């Protein structure tokens, strides 16, 4: 199996903080790898170094196999807001398709010999059909308004455009940073299927455990600045990781026992420190380093009181809302109850976030009434993320909420202690919020929401940018949460763990209440669609099959069809001769630029016409 990527001794630091030092690894053809680690340990930085966006500190080498194409999907796409969707994708494909880029450059330069070579390369790579390919990929990702300006897109729509750019590169090696962020579940499942079928080699960072398990065959972990690789899915990784920790702890314990004996020798025999014993003194210090290793894993600790919640939570009565001419809610009525756990799902743009803003009181409905209970205390974790003032520090953000936090047993915890529990050490208190990583900001935002002691949590895409370790802790907390819970999420595993029924936003203001987990809902949908297809087949008029003997031949063509077939064959022959003649003209090297451009366009047209006629020829012959 060929080695697609060899990484040797790369390092990355920010200030006095080392993310990783002198790490090396190899990725082979066909590997589909998920990179896991806590937030702030360098996952995104490592991907950017591999993609050539950032550089390793102090040397090291990143070496891809010669001539393989590498595509990088960053968390946030930087685009030209004035371009249309189609123009943006086409421009990016031009940047990364050497054949198309060279063809357009040759046309602009007016270099006949260069254009001749560029046309031959376009023929070989089927580059003439690029516009058709763009339309196909955009449609499969449910992007239909191709003339819409990039600056008008939502986060989910921009992410789908970025995915289209990546898919169209047809690269052998994909590097993807949180590919499921901001996508609705239908598109996640489409991407999941695409990557399962693809023969590409893949390295990605994702927090979506279902996506990870269904796509990847290898887990790569950054732990204490080093890389560890595990073959198998996420569950297998957890088992092997625990086994590695057990073995490492045994080695550390062994080193500590040996260290005690060596420490006695060092202290009791100072006269032995001669040249002959120097090797033993050096070995003592090596042993001391091994014995001082701690395998303690830091996880956030969520311990906050839940304010008392009365019998009345939120009552919605005939609530309607329209936005920009579209119905978001149509006569919606529902009474939320204490301890209820609702998951909200639906495609992008059907009004999920708008619904959260309505019931939390941030916006008013067009019609109907929303009443909140007197004891209701909402903690709203918005998809937009944390709000902070320019230059504001971590501690200043927290102290704006409170100086102390009320724990579940009633005692008070200082804001600084609570920051420690959310993995913000003392030396990070004065760090500016704007320089935190995406995951660190999300963790700080979660802390600020929870320290208000809410009795109803409204979480809008809470899994974005949180690492898997933090998500595990959050899931455990939410399962024990005594208040009411409303979650919008595209993370299917998270929904399965945390909610007991779903509001399914079907569009045009309709909401379906489904009792059960998300996986059960998907099974229900599949069974329903299968039953509908069976019903359609049963309802369709049944044509009796014609009686045939063993030697029955195909249906004879009508006179008109026979003449059409003969004409197609004649046309194909003529088009083949014309194309050969045009290609011969190009090869002569004597054509003026204007004629060369005209010939190349005619060849493109011939290719399209031949494809259409060959398709019709096959239909007639069948």
Image (cartoon, rainbow, N blue to C red):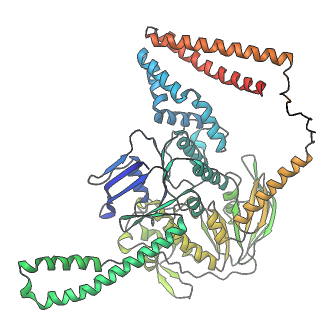
Q: Left or right: 147 with respect to 466? A: right
**What number of labels is visible?**
0
Residue 101: x and y, percent?
A: 46, 29
Residue 538, relative to residue 518: is it above or below? Answer: above
Nearer to me, 260 or 225: 260
| Residue at the spot 43% in from the left edge and 68% down from the top edge | 394
Nearer to me, 227 or 446: 227
List the single residue furthest toward the front: 550
| Residue at the spot 24% in from the left edge and 78% down from the top edge | 287
Quadrant assignment, res 341: bottom right
Residue 251, relative to residue 119: is it above or below? Answer: below
| Residue at the spot 47% in from the left edge and 29% down from the top edge | 99
Nearer to me, 301 or 36: 36
Quadrant where the image shows the C terminus = top right
| Residue at the spot 59% in from the left edge and 46% down from the top edge | 160
Residue 570: x and y, percent?
A: 70, 12
Residue 411: x and y, percent?
A: 52, 88
**Residue 300 visible in the snapshot:** yes
**Residue 365 visible in the snapshot:** no
Residue 88, relative to residue 246: is it above or below? Answer: above
Residue 340: x and y, percent?
A: 72, 74
Nearer to me, 253 or 543: 543
């Amino acid at each position: 199996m060929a080695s697609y990527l060899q990484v040797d001794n790369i390092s990355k630091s920010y200030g006095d903080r080392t993310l990783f030092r002198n790490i090396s690894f190899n990725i082979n053809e066909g590997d589909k790898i998920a990179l896991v680690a806590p937030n702030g340990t360098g996952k995104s930085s490592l991907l950017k170094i591999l993609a050539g966006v950032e550089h390793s500190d102090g040397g090291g080498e990143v070496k891809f196999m010669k001539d393989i194409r590498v595509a990088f999907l960053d968390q946030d796409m930087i685009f030209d807001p004035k371009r249309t969707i189609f123009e943006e994708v086409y421009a990016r494909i031009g940047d990364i398709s050497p054949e198309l880029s060279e063809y357009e450059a040759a046309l602009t330069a007016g270099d006949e010999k260069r254009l001749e070579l560029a046309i031959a390369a376009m023929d070989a790579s089927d580059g003439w059909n690029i516009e058709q390919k763009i339309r196909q990929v955009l449609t499969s990702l449910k992007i239909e308004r191709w003339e819409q300006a990039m600056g008008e897109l939502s986060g989910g729509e921009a992410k789908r455009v970025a995915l289209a750019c990546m898919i169209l590169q047809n690269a052998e090696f994909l590097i993807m940073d949180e590919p499921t962020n901001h996508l609705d579940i239908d598109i996640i499942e489409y991407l999941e299927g695409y990557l399962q079928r693809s023969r590409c080699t893949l390295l990605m960072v994702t927090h979506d455990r279902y996506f990870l398990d269904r796509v990847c065959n290898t887990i790569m972990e950054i732990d204490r600045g080093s890389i560890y690789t595990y073959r198998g899915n996420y569950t297998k990784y957890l088992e092997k990781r625990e086994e590695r920790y057990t073995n490492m702890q045994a080695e550390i314990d062994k080193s500590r026992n040996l260290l005690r004996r060596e420490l006695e020798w060092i202290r009791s025999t100072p006269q032995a420190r001669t040249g002959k014993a120097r090797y033993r003194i050096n070995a003592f210090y090596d042993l001391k380093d091994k014995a001082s290793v701690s395998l303690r894993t830091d996880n956030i600790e969520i311990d906050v009181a839940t304010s008392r919640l009365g019998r009345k939570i939120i009552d919605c009565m005939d609530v309607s809302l329209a936005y920009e001419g579209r119905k978001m809610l149509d006569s919606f009525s529902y009474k939320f109850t204490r301890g209820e756990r609702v998951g909200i799902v639906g495609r992008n743009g059907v009004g999920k976030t708008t619904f959260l803003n309505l019931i939390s009181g941030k916006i008013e409905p067009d019609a109907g009434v929303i009443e909140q209970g007197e004891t209701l205390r909402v903690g709203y974790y918005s998809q937009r993320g944390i709000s902070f003032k320019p230059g504001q520090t971590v501690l200043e953000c927290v102290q704006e909420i409170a100086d102390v936090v009320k724990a579940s047993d009633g005692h008070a915890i200082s804001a600084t202690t609570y920051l420690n529990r959310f993995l913000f050490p003392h030396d990070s208190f004065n760090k500016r919020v704007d320089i935190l990583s995406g995951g660190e900001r999300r963790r700080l935002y979660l802390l600020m929401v929870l320290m208000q002691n809410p009795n109803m949590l409204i979480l809008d895409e809470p899994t974005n940018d949180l690492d898997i370790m933090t998500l595990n802790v959050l899931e455990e907390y939410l399962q024990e949460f005594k208040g009411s819970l409303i979650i919008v999420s595209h993370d299917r595993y998270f929904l399965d763990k945390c909610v007991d029924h779903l509001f399914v936003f079907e569009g045009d203001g309709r909401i379906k209440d489904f009792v059960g987990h998300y996986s059960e809902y998907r099974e229900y949908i599949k069974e329903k669609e299968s039953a509908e297809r069976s019903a359609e087949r049963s309802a369709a008029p049944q044509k009796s099959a014609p009686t045939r003997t063993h030697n029955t031949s195909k249906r004879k063509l009508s006179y008109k069809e026979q003449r059409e077939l003969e004409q197609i064959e004649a046309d194909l022959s003529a088009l083949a001769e014309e194309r050969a003649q045009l290609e011969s003209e190009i090869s002569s090297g004597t054509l003026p630029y204007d004629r060369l451009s005209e010939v190349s366009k005619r060849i493109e047209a011939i290719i399209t016409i031949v494809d259409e006629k060959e398709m019709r020829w096959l239909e007639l012959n069948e």
